[in-house]
Image (cartoon, helix red, strand yellow):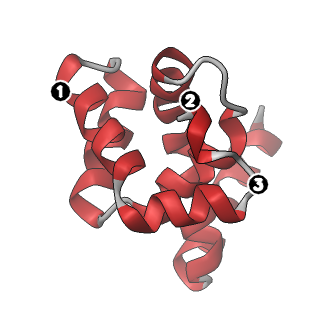
Amino acid sequence: MRYLAGFACLAVLAACTDPEVGEQMVGDAMRPAIQEVVSKEYPLVPAPPVVQCVIDNANEEESTRILQAAIEGVTGRDNIMIVRIVNRPGTQACISDAGVPLGMM
């Protein structure tokens, strides 16, 4: 157990010193909430690339709300926000670049 706590501390310290690690940790924490919405709203679409595009295109306020949803549960408001992020031109371009046909969206 002590080793696990030590590893967690090292991960937090690494996140503080390397912005990419911090961004990765935030993205990983956001993933379940986004996955839930994408799977529900777009059941025929391969979720992983869409989820990553939402992570990449969410602003700071949206990221904070998605993190909260990942902890407390996705609300209807969160669902609408994630769908709006999916429908942004930048996110749509990301999804298309990832090889997901936009006609499936």
Going 56% across and 56% down the picture, which residue do you hit?
53
Question: Amino acid type of disc 1?
Answer: Arg
What residue is shown with label 3?
99
Furthest residue toward left? 77
The residue lying at 58 percent from left, 46 percent from top is 102
The residue labelled by disc 2 is: 35
Q: Which comes before the other along the chain, label 2 or label 1?
A: 2
Quadrant location of residue 20?
Answer: bottom right
**Image coordinates for residue 44, horizontal then vertical, percent:** 66, 21
Q: Residue at x 47, y 60 (%)?
A: 91
Residue neighbourhood size for the residue with mark 3, other residues' Cα within 10 Å, grouped as few (<14), some (14–19), many (≥20):
few
Task: Tell me whether the residue at label 2 lies in contact with that at label 3, contact meaning CB atoms closer than 8 angstroms.
Answer: no
Q: Where is residue 22? Give x, y as percent.
A: 56, 68
User: In terms of sequence position, does the residue under pointer 1 or pointer 3 come before the other?
Assistant: 1
Q: Amino acid at mark 3?
A: Gly
Residue 91 in view, yes or no: yes
Left or right: residue 86 versus residue 52 is left
Helix, strand or loop at mark 3: loop
Residue at 67% across / 50% down in the picture? 8
Instruction: Calculate the distance from the C-alpha at mark 2 to the C-alpha at mark 1.
Output: 15 Å
What numbered label is drawn on residue 88?
none
Cα–Cα span, label 1 and label 3: 28 Å
Closest to the camera, between mark 1 and mark 3, is: 3
Residue 10 seen in the figure: no
- Distance, label 2 to label 3, CA atoms, is 18 Å
Q: Amino acid at mark 2?
A: Gln
- Name the residue nearer the viewer: 89 or 17: 89
Picture coordinates of residue 93 (x, y %)? 54, 66
